[in-house]
Amino acid sequence: MRVLVGHPFDILTTQDLTATNPAQSDETPADARQVNCATLPLQDAVKVVKGDGSRLLAVFSDPRCPYCKALDEELAKLDNVTVYTFLLPWLGPESRPAAEALWAGAVPDRANDTTVLDRNLKLASQLGLRGTQMLIASDGRVSEGARSAEALDAWLTLQSREVASRTSVNKEQP
């Protein structure tokens, strides 16, 4: 027996045909939300720096989620990025020991502080996270769901170009 699971999309508008109409919903779509990265408690995340670490990306992830694991493989392909991963034990009781083990291995000096997982769950709720994964760029843009390394790189590069563009415009004005 095979089951096909997914969302139908209108390829011309790239609209998810199963999504709630934002005009009829109180929920803001992930790509329309903004998060002030300065307010994120980065000390409660696992930090990985690749290359010069010039681009920042916060990721909310459950260590048992197969989609999160796929995203981790794509994140490993990026260069010049600092990734802060907020571990979330969402997928049942088995997720908690897995998240605790990852936390202890990545942050050995705080291995016994497993309350970090409770704080991450509270933060995810405050940010309106509806499921893993959630990505936040340093300029506050939010994206939910996995992306390929190429798509992530383009998404993060867009941020760098926008900052450079604003900077050059400000220099040109008297």
Image (cartoon, rainbow, N blue to C red):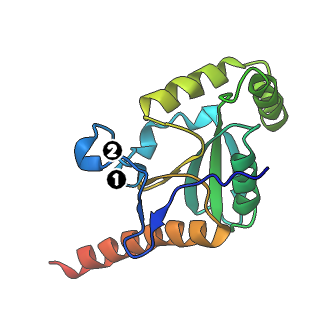
CA distance for labels 2 and 1? 6 Å
> What is the residue that sits farthest to the left in this orientation?
174
Query: How many labels, in total?
Result: 2
Left or right of 140 on screen, residue 5: right
Circle 1 residues within 10 Å: few <14, some 14–19, many ≥20: few
| Label 2 sits on residue | 28
Amino acid at dot 2: Thr
Left or right of 41 on screen, residue 172: left
| Label 1 sits on residue | 32
Q: Position of residue 147 (x, y in %)?
A: 61, 62
Left or right of 76 on screen, residue 150: left
| Quadrant assignment, res 45 | top right
Q: Position of residue 148 (x, y in %)?
A: 65, 66
| Quadrant assignment, res 35 | top left
Q: Position of residue 41 (x, y in %)?
A: 53, 33
Relative to 120, is 153 above or below?
Answer: below
Of 153 and 104, the residue lying toward us = 153
Residue at 26% over, 78% down: 169
Relative to 133, is 101 above or below?
Answer: above
Q: Are marks 2 and 1 in contact (CB under 8 Å)?
A: yes
Left or right of 10 on screen, residue 151: right
Residue at 33% over, 44% down: 28
Q: Quadrant of the C terminus?
A: bottom left
Which numbered disc covers residue 91?
Answer: none
Q: Secondary structure at mark 2?
A: loop
Of 12 and 134, the residue lying toward us = 12
Amino acid at dot 1: Ala
| Quadrant assignment, res 163 | bottom left
Relative to 71, is 133 above or below?
Answer: above
Of 111 and 174, the residue lying toward us = 111
Q: Position of residue 6 (x, y in %)?
A: 58, 54
